[in-house]
Image: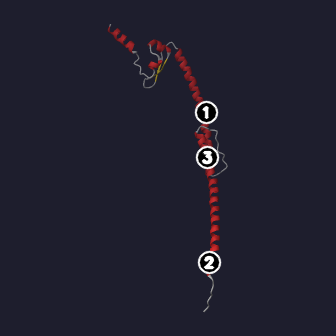
Amino acid sequence: MIRIISSYEPISAAITKQLINEIAISIVLLQIVVFSSYILAGELIRPVQNILYKVNRLSSGDFRARIEVKRQDELGVLGRQINMMADNMGHYTEELQLKNNENQAIKERLESIINQMADAIHVTDLSGEILEVNKAFEQLYGWNSDEIVGVKLDFVPHSYQGRERAGSRS
């Protein structure tokens, strides 16, 4: 029979010291992992944030906003596609502005011609409501444009309708 007598306190102290060391090391490693994850997530999210920022600028009408594309992955492809979309939208917006300016000039020319003509002219929409009349129309029929615009014309003013009926009876 062999018997060993030993005090439990030195063993307990060594185990406690080892446990504290391992907890401290675990806490430091956990902090390193959390900090590294934060940095890595920032690196992964930053290109998406940049794309979102540029898309917001595009949606507000700034077609000169460009995404700097350095990547060859899906985010790089997305950035290039957004840049192409911005180019196309800018081009089409310029074309629309030119067409709008042309239409405005033509409209002004036509309005000038209509207003200078000696013949009574009225412009209606598809439902027959008057959109515009010229000065000769106002003078001939006795209406001013404020009274007649938006009205469906019966082609004869009420004041003349009575005269025509009276004239047709005679």
Q: CB under 8 Å between callouts 3 and 2? A: no
Asked whether the residues under the numbered discs 1 and 3 touch, taking CB atoms below 8 Å apart as contact, a structural biologist would say no
Secondary element under disc 3, as helix, strand or loop, is helix
- The answer to whether mark 2 and mark 1 are in CB contact below 8 A is no
User: Looking at the image, is mark 2 or mark 1 nearer the viewer?
Assistant: 2
Residue tagged by mark 3? 51
Q: Secondary structure at mark 2?
A: helix
Give the amino acid at mark 1: Glu
Q: CA distance from mark 3 to mark 2?
A: 59 Å
Answer few, some or many: residues within 10 Å of disc 3's Cα (few below 14, many 20 plus, some between 14 and 19).
many
Q: Residue at x 32, y 9 (%)?
A: 169
Task: Categorize mark 2 by other alpha carbons within 10 Å: few (<14), some (14-19), many (20+).
Answer: few
Residue 104 in the image: state x and y as whole percent.
Answer: 56, 25
Which residue corresponds to mark 2?
A: 12
Label 1, label 3: how many angstroms apart (C-alpha)?
24 Å
Secondary element at tag 1 = helix
- Mark 2–mark 1 Cα distance, whole angstroms, equals 82 Å
The disc label shown at residue 61, or none:
none
Tell me the amino acid under the disc marked 2: Ser
Q: Nearer the viewer, residue 66 or 30?
A: 30
Q: Which residue is mark 1?
A: 94
